[in-house]
Image (spheres, helix red, strand yellow):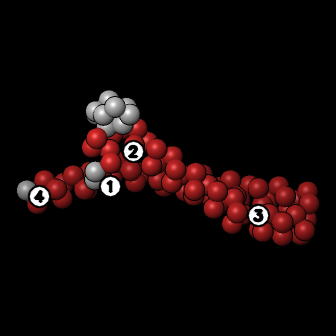
Amino acid sequence: MERNNDFFIRSTFRTYLIPTILALLGTTITVLIDSIIIGNFLGEKGLAALNLVKPVYFTFMTLGSLISVGAAANASVYYQYPNDDENGFPERHWHY
């Protein structure tokens, strides 16, 4: 049983490793390109403004990712157990 679980964890990790690396690489390249363009056109003050706004931007991106992943998980449970109670929400959805 432990060997099957270990295989499942390793295969799942490998499945998500490349997309995660590509997403982080894309975000890093986007920030680098923004910094180059803003630095060339707006100078020091533009870069200062960009660096002040980056934490706010990443906070919103993180919250958006959390909400979308949670909504996707809830939707998958809903589609697996449709209409189990009178409100249209699966009974299992509320009991983890």
Residue 13 x, y percent position in the rendering: 32, 55
Q: Which is nearer the N-term, disc 1 or disc 3?
A: 1
Spot occupied by residue 49 in the image (x, y as percentages of width and height) = 84, 66
Q: Which mark is residue 71?
A: none
C-alpha span from label 3 to label 4:
47 Å
Say if residue 24 shows up in the picture: yes
- Quick one: which residue is furthest to the left in this view? 1
The answer to whether the residues at label 2 and label 4 have Cβ atoms under 8 Å apart is: no
User: Foreground: 84 or 11?
Assistant: 84
Task: Assign a secondary structure to mark 3.
Answer: helix
- Whether 35 is drawn above or below 14: the answer is below
Q: Amino acid at mark 1?
A: Phe
Cα separation between marks 2 and 4? 27 Å
Residue beneath disc 1: 13
Mark 1 or mark 3: which is in front? 3
The residue that label 3 is drawn on is: 53
* Residue holding disc 2: 73
Residue 84, how many percent across, how many down?
28, 33
Badge 2 crowding class, 10 Å Cα cut-off, few under 14, some 14 to 19, many 20 or more, is: few
Report if residue 78 is visible in the image. Answer: no
Which badge, 4 or 1, is on the more N-terminal residue?
Answer: 4
Does label 2 or label 3 sit earlier along the sequence? 3
Disc 4 designates what residue? Answer: 3
